[in-house]
Image (tube, rainbow, N blue to C red):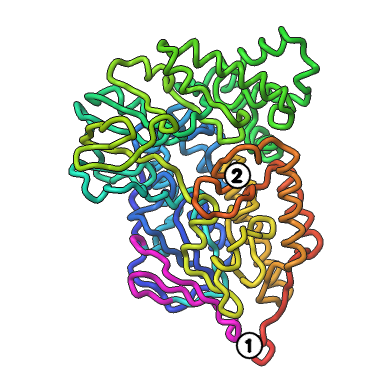
Amino acid sequence: MSTATKLQRSAPASVVPPHADIVVIGAGFGGMYAHHRFRQLGLSVFGFEQGTDVGGTWYWNRYPGARCDVESVDYTYTFSNELLEEWTWSERFSTQPEILEYAEFVADRFDLRRDIKFETKIVSAIYDEAANLWNVRTDQGDAITCHYVVTTVGCLSVPKDPEFEGLENFKGEWVQTGAWPKEGVDWAGKNVLVVGTGSSAIQTIPEVAKTAGHLTVFQRTANYSVPAYNGPLPEHRQKEVFADYPGYLQMLKKSRGGQVFELQTDSMAAEFTPEQQQERLQQAWELGRWNIQGCFRDITLNEDANKLAADFVHAKIRETVKDPATAEKLIPRGYPLGTKRLCLDSDYYATFNRENVDLVDINEEPIVRITEGGLQTSKQEYPADLIIFAIGFDAMTGPLVNLGIEGRGGQSLKSAWHDGPECYLGIAAPGFPNLFMVNGPSSVSVLSNMILTLEHHVDWIADCISYMRDNGYDRLEAREDATHEWAAHTEMVANRTLFPKANSWYMGANVTGKPRMFMAYIGGFDNYVARFDAVAAKGFEGFDLSTSKVEENA
């Protein structure tokens, strides 16, 4: 764990005020920073969080093996030099418990809980156009009005429900990776089934396999995964990061993904000889993390370049997994490498060499139902004491449309996005004045270092509200023309890449009935920030700023 000094726990709010300048929904890293930053403006802030404490993603995702896939030195707040000095990470890729401890430390350090009510769900946020106020209500009967609503609900915070026939009759225990029980789960010596092979499952499976009596993994789509090589920060990275840490942080903020990789290059694959291509791929594999995506500038743009990397990973899987039939099942096919989020693992492929682990391809052997004693496929029944569902999330839009948001004219956000989300800069939507969505659809969010994107959005919102106050405005709304333009630009940039070729959660393809569109901005964190800067420099271009009738008649 960290070397930081343990602080006295700050107390949460006990009373909800009738009004606040800003209501913040969510108390993950975005919500926590929002409280700190908006307080600096002298604004009254109040927040709500479903969990019992801060942490967001790292509060809910307590599954075995859960750890960040961004290096700890990059996945950290940058707003406070003192905080950077007070906290030291213990591993290259931090575990969920350590990241949650960090969140709690920050909450204590800046007394963030005092204006947050926990164990509380938002059931509606309705805009009153005449009063230019939002009316926010909770499942606890709370009611509060505010000038601004800021959502910091995360992009991956609504787990997909397991919709399997017969689940209600299962006599054993079942859990979801995205809503792991706080009290923990015991799988030692038991028959365990894991349904899914996405990022959460790839982290869970090696840990469960160590002590489970028998583990059976049910896979629909094989995913690309590369070794994390977790442990202490390597010496070459230590020198790179800490020789000039302030300069390093600035370099992160000017990078395409909020991270800097050793093998990043502006050279295309074809500019290297075949021997050099293989050397770079091997070097990337040995360095770990997402270096393999930086081997060639066109790895997510050009099918030939992508195939080089994909074939290399295929060979590594065959080399690692001893049973040829199992190896072939684990080889990703039908989509380019990196167009589903590339996973980082610790001994994932090697786990399938264990005698107590089996793999079932549900394309060949579909799941029929859950039985009282396990899981029935088209071929046989698999007995289970515990079923772990790692089947993903209703990404990007799910956390927002479930808040009961209604804007001008009583239009709900859910209906406004019925044909797909259009969100100006990924932060605001037409028809919803004074509503800011941190890391909303069409933001760079999930394609970048989330901590940096959260800080950037919150800082920009704070600057926007300051500008409005200084210039006598109290209402801001994204314009439809600007929003359509941003949506078209986001789609155009995505279509230049190979990403739309995959049926991924980026495209909404994992949720039945969800419109198919690429929901993130893939143009790079550096270009994204530049666009925000340009918008602000032009008096918040693309937004209508006005003074409400209430103020005019005051």
Q: Residue furthest front?
A: 378
Q: Residue furthest bottom?
A: 553
> In the image, which residues are magenta?
118-143
The span from disc 1 to disc 2 (Cα, nearest Å) is: 37 Å
Q: Is residue 98 visible?
A: yes
Marker count (numbered): 2
Q: Position of residue 303 (x, y in %)?
A: 71, 27
The residue at 39%/35% (across/down) is 366
Identify which residue, 385 or 368, lies in the foreground: 368
Residue 181 horizontal side relative to residue 146, left or right:
left
What is the quadrant of residue 235 in the picture? Answer: top right
The residue at 54%/44% (across/down) is 505
What kind of residue is marked 1?
Answer: Val
Q: Label 2 crowding class (10 Å Cα cut-off): few <14, some 14-19, many 20+?
A: many
Identify which residue, 115 or 544, lies in the foreground: 544
Residue 175 horizontal side relative to residue 219, left or right:
left
Q: Residue furthest top?
A: 275
What kind of residue is marked 2?
Answer: Leu
Q: Where is residue 240 in the image (x, y as percent from the top left)?
A: 63, 24
Residue bearing mark 1:
550
What is the quadrant of residue 293 in the picture? Answer: top right
The residue at 61%/71% (across/down) is 432
Q: Label 1 crowding class (10 Å Cα cut-off): few <14, some 14-19, many 20+?
A: few
Location of residue 94 with respect to 434 vertically, above or below? above
**First-in-chain label (1 vs 2):** 2
The secondary element bearing badge 2 is classed as: helix
Residue bearing mark 2:
452
Location of residue 91 with respect to 176 vertically, above or below? above
Is residue 460 covered in magenta?
no
The residue at 70%/76% (across/down) is 473
Q: Quadrant of the N terminus?
A: top left
